[in-house]
Image (spheres, rainbow, N blue to C red):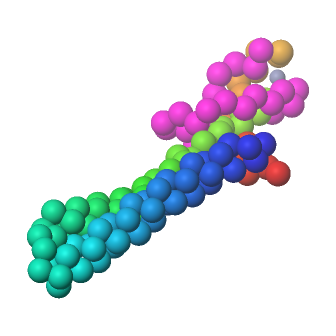
Amino acid sequence: MNEKKSVTRKVSSLLMAIVLIILALSVAAFYYGIAAYVEGGDGSLLLLIGFSGMALSTYMLLQTRRKMPRIVFKPYQIATTILCQKCGFKNIREFQRGDYIFKEAEECPKCKEKMMIASIYREAEEKEKD
Ligand SMILES: [Zn+2]
């Protein structure tokens, strides 16, 4: 049950590690670029690589943080329980627009009596069960 969650965590931590490596390399490139300038050489390429690498990794970090809540979010599953008042037959189906409690529903398959909507509730998500 928890396999999917741990896989997602592994992927995001791997991505995080890659981003941090890019960031570290960019900082190193930036540092060497400055050092080259100090020594009188041409460090503009290293500075450019370092700067764009830092900008890219910072952008990626911000993107992954923004995407996190979207992945976690799941739409509600609403269920409607239809109950036969005569024989007690119970039927659960997906919520449909216009459903309300005590609304008359379809015929009971057992006794052919008109059934009634007994309750409308949010279905417990399967993944929440541990
Ligand atoms: Zn019935």
Residue at the farthest bottom position = 38
Q: Residue at x 84, y 27 (%)?
A: 89
Range drawn in magenta: 85-109
Q: Say left or right for 92 vs 17.
A: right
Task: Find out whether residue 112 is within the magenta segment.
Answer: no
Q: Say left or right for 90 vs 107.
A: right
Q: Is residue 34 above or below residue 103?
A: below
Residue 53 location, quadrant: bottom left
Near-viewer residue (1 or 117): 1
Q: Residue at x 72, y 28 (%)?
A: 115
Near-viewer residue (15 or 104): 15
Residue 51: x and y in percent read 22, 68
Can residue 17 be seen from the camera position used here? Answer: yes
Residue 62: x and y in percent read 36, 65
Q: Residue at x 82, y 51 (%)?
A: 130
Q: Residue at x 21, y 66 (%)?
A: 46
Q: Give the main secondary structure of the magenta stretch.
A: loop
Q: Is residue 112 above or below residue 51?
A: above
Task: Find out whether residue 108 is within the magenta segment.
Answer: yes
Tell which quarter ligand 1 is in. top right
Can residue 123 be seen from the camera position used here? Answer: no
Residue 6: x and y in percent read 69, 50
